[in-house]
Image (spheres, rainbow, N blue to C red):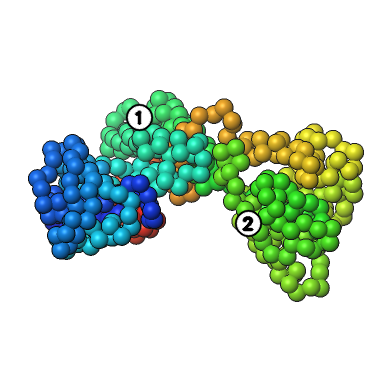
Amino acid sequence: MVTAPPPAAGDTIVAVATAAGRGGVGILRLSGAMAFAVAHALTGAPLPAPRQAALRTFHDADGAALDQGLLLCFRAPASFTGEDVVELQGHGSAAALDALLRAACVHGARVARPGEFSERAFVNGKLDLAQAEAIIDLVDAGSARAAKAAFQSLEGRFSTRITALAEALVAARVFIEGALDFSDQDVDWLADADLHARLAALDEDLQHLSADAQRGRALQQGLTVVLSGAPNVGKSTLLNQLAGVDAAIVTDVPGTTRDLLREHLTLDGLPVTLIDTAGLRDTEDAIEAEGIRRAWAAIEQADLVWFLVDDRQGMSADDAALLTRLGPDRPCWRLANKVDLSGGVVGWRPGGDPPTLGLAAKAGQGVADLVAALHRHAGLNASDEPLFTARTRHIDALRRAAAHLRLARTQLADQAFAELAAEELRLAHDALGEITGRFSQEDLLGRIFAGFCIGK
């Protein structure tokens, strides 16, 4: 089921589990067969009963007293990693923690790789892969809303729904293969209306889960929004208004912005990367031309493009040409800026193609409407409770599972292709298994856990 190799027998790892630098508390964490023996060597005293804290003096590799703090032991399998685990909770001194780390290695432990504690929890069946990823999502959460969603994933809400779908796919596949094995009987099992209804319901459930996962991805990874348009229409002013600081230089001189300027913001709980770009126009200036080339490259990778125009001038022929170049498949909103100078109305304009919002970036008018619309675009409403976090790889796996399920339903309609339908259901099941780690390649697992903190 799990392709990651198990930890070597007797292999005990150690790491500092708290953030680098000064702090009130510093924690050293051990996991493995020798964790208790190493802890005894570091303290020179009997270990407390599992899950009971005891005050102990910690010693360096030479046996000299170094610090004093709490010692906690967790006996396998009732621990985070499923192995014997020990935590030494002392003062947050980087020097003392480093000395304790070196002493632990002298006594038989080795320094853990990034994410190795969570990897062991996964290998030992304490967490599935989606839950393990939720740990780093919780650590990296940029808002309380994202933290709540990550905790829901850690608690298994996402995994539970994946498992239910996977089990239903297996049941449908077993039914189809059983019908093929008994195809010589008079009963046409493959024409069973209940089977087709079950597959249709599965398809619908998978679509709902994909939509929820898209919301979770927005909370976890955020959206990338590119501000584009002709020079001097207020792109940098809008960036500064949303950032709350003068992140971009603003002048009346067209072409002031020549390179990409990225600002990472949290707008009402939604992580957003805003990219201010050079004004899009023909130019003989080599530096400005390079900035424009980079602007188009950023637009290609954006989740959403905000195309700004000066409302006093309206849409020019050049603006229309730029919008045409963006293409119909690129999510884009037109922002009619400077309505305070044009006498225009703040707010969304009916019938706009692309959707058009009147605003005054410098005065902040219409900005709240823009942020609210951004939440709707991400599938989030202020009143929604977070479901779970998700990642791009999860979205891709759900997309592939849905595609295989649709193919299975199509092929099942023609009984000559029923065997292919069963195979498509297997592929859909395997795609879902990638999310929880049931069918994940070892190199994928390595990349995922390498992104964790040391000590996690």
Nearest the viewer among 406 and 217 is: 217
Residue 75 seen in this snapshot: yes
Q: Amino acid at mark 1?
A: Trp
Q: How crowded is the residue under tag 1: few (<14 C-alpha within 10 Å), some, or many (20+)?
A: some
Q: Position of residue 409 (x, y in %)?
A: 45, 37
Residue under the point 22% across and 48% down: 68
Q: How crowded is the residue under tag 2: few (<14 C-alpha within 10 Å), some, or many (20+)?
A: some
Q: Residue furthest toward the top?
A: 194
Residue under the point 71% across and 57% down: 248
Say above or below: 258 vs 407: below
- Judged left or right of residue 330, residue 237 is right
Cα distance between the residues tagged 1 and 2: 58 Å
**Dot 1 corresponds to which residue?**
189
Residue 308 numbered mark, or none? none
- Judged left or right of residue 41, residue 254 is right
Task: Say which quarter of the image contains residue 448.
Answer: bottom left
Task: Say which quarter of the image contains residue 355.
Answer: top right
Q: Position of residue 440 (x, y in %)?
A: 34, 52
Residue under the point 66% across and 35% down: 372
**Dot 2 corresponds to which residue?**
262
